[in-house]
Amino acid sequence: MPLRWCEHCHQHRDPRGFAKHSSACKHEQDAIASATTSLSALQNTTVTRGFQPRKRRHIENDSSRDINHSYDFDSSYVSVSNPLPGPQVVQPSLQMPPTAHIKIIHHPHSNITKPTIIPLESSLNPELEPESCSMSHETPALQPIVAESVPWAPFRNIQDFEYMEIAESRITLENHRDMEQALKAARAYVVPEGIVSATYNGQTFTFKFPYRDPWKIYENWITDPTLSWEIFWYPVQKYLCQNGKELAVYDDINTGKLWWTIQDTLPNIDGLPHCFLPTIFWLDKGMITKRVRKHPMLLRLAFLPRAIRNGSGNGGGVLIGYMPVVQDPRDPSDRSSAEKLAFACFKCEVYHKVLSVIFGSLRSRGRCGEAMECGDLIRQVIYPGIPIASVDSKESWALTSTRAGLAEYPCPKCLVSNCEQHKLVSEFKLRTVGAMKQAFEEAMRSLTKSASEKILQQNGLHATFNFFWSLPHSDPYLAISYDKLYADDLGKFGKHLWPLLLSVLEELNAKGQLTVNMHKVERWPNLKHFSNVTTVDYADGAVFFDILRCLLPCIVQLLPRDSALVKCLCAYARYRMMIQMHCMTEDRIQRLRSYIKTYMNSCVRVSAEHGKNFDFLKQHLVTHAIQDIEQKGTLDNYDTRVGEGFHQEVQEAYAQTNCKNTEPQMARIDENQEAVARIRMLIENAKLRAMSGSESESEESQPRSSESEDHWVLGSPISSLTDAKGLANELVSRGLVQNTHEFQSTL
């Protein structure tokens, strides 16, 4: 049955028991408003903003959304934030913060001077919610967004749109050209074609690629009224206050230090807010068929809650284009080291020239900003930037113009030597835009090729100008983020520790017993069960993670007493479970540091006993995990697992092409799907509003019982119906049929 709209708490509710809910909700709101007014009178102050009703949310009900309710020290200003999951409440009559609470300090540019307090103990109705703390400016109470009278536009009628979705009847589309014209009008973006060229071995190669202007995508996001109330306009600092201690809390991206630092550099002008709104850049090369490889690029909104930006609906990731795949004209095994380096430099040059074309529109706007009226009807100056990149190791080397894992300085984030990557608690000199740009320019000014190569080699750089050096607020070395999928599940464990364990068990003739032990592990929700774990032919990151979760009890009796490998796997498992958390505090980070130290010491023992070399990049990246958490929030915010699922959409789009010049066709297919999804959302919103309106009118016109106060009454609750159309409208309002056409077609 469809949900019903409550005018008191402004949310959809189950129709069963709706009357009781409406009455209780109204009583609860009146009580809170009365308590707020009384407290204001006692304090001899004027309430500037009363309790705001719960805002209307999207159609999709995502239980993973972090929604918390809060109050300030001053009861005249009530706000809410999204720091930790779990129901919270508003307590306007309380003057002192509770013993255990979350304190949120807003950035000074937000003009919110008082910290927001979120109590960790609830006593009022958890369904009540004040205004969102992402609304950093004084705005009127949120009103329901009025949809257009024809939400299916630019299609002529809803039957045309639904035909385009499921090929229904009663349409006005006469041919395929009509449908294409309607889709063209519905598309939000124009996909131009970019062209770049680069020279290799004296031959010039030209590459063409479709792309979308990222600034147009920015504008569409920021001016969308359905998203504006969810946007984090400013960063915050969160603290867990308990037992007289304050511990910093890191969860979503807006709680990290990086966003706060960038916002500090922007002007602070009264009456004209200046906001930095970051995005997450993802790209990855994948096999679409056995012979075809594609390289899609996505942008995700770091200024929206992760439950929205990681989804596929409104506010989710947007395809901005396909990186050209540079085909190798020769067999790499026939090249010398110098030739391999030259070809790698050529690919890197193509890579950054393409990015320069795609993100060129963000350069000036990232430096000076651009004033625009946002979806909340407030005029602001927006500064775009890409401070976070969600990529694997190969893409991180290309994005930072650094050399690969066998180079003398292989890390894209720091200048660690190749032979020191096993040192996980040491500090190494970090790469910075200024230092790397200076080294590149010095190498280009060198008089000889050998002198230039020496400078580049000492810094682990290619002879390629990095585009991100010219893009404000987009440090590529800080943007590279720790990724659990490639660094751990498919890295340290999948390619190193797990194969080492199997080889040791094979020497002890114990692989079969491991299979038996793993098969006896009890089944558990969201845990893969292995019947023959030692002969798994194909395993992705999730499979390796599940193996790690079950492994220790299954091997402790198979290896010798006080085995270094068991202790190493135990230490690694603790580290892996800790970085999986969606919320990190200072004490958890300190515990993580101790786990890293224990893991490093156990790896030293494993190296001594089994000859394992831990000097590889994915081992070294552990040294940057804590820094990424403090700078950009917990690691799940920029996990590549979110983007990996897009390869399936690329495969589906490729299957709809004619297999010739496919990338422009695939970009158009993706645009059509976005346009259809957007129109469908508007139609469903319009249906819900119409349904709630018809239900309220029906309740008002419903005949009341006579003087009797009995709990029963004779008669039908439906008003008198005189024709089939009236019956159809009544059935639609009750959710028994989708539309009147569906009912009338059955008569």
Image (spheres, rainbow, N blue to C red):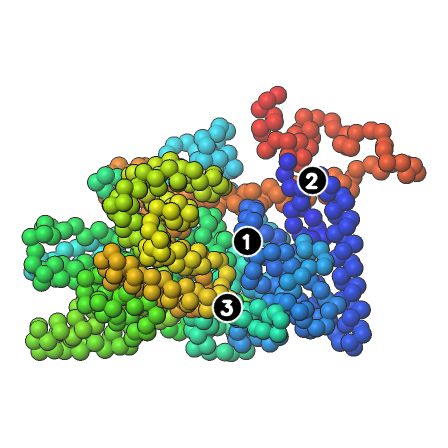
Residue plotted at (7% across, 56% down): 335
The numbered disc on residue 587 is: 3
- In primary-sequence order, the first of circles 3 and 2 is 2
Q: Position of residue 680 (x, y in %)?
A: 50, 42
Residue ID for mark 1: 65
Circles 1, 2 touching at the beta carbon (< 8 Å): no
Reply above or below: 576 against 693.
Answer: below
Tag 3, which secondary structure? helix
Residue ID for mark 2: 15
Which quarter of the rendered picture does the C terminus lie within? top right
Q: Position of residue 565 (x, y in %)?
A: 32, 55
Q: Residues within 10 Å of mark 2 (few under 14, many from 20)?
A: some
Q: CA distance from mark 1 to mark 2?
A: 23 Å
Reply above or below: 572 against 172.
Answer: below
Residue plotted at (48% across, 35% down): 162
Q: Amino acid at mark 3?
A: Asp
Q: Position of residue 551 (x, y in %)?
A: 39, 47
- In primary-sequence order, the first of circles 3 and 1 is 1
Circles 3, 2 touching at the beta carbon (< 8 Å): no
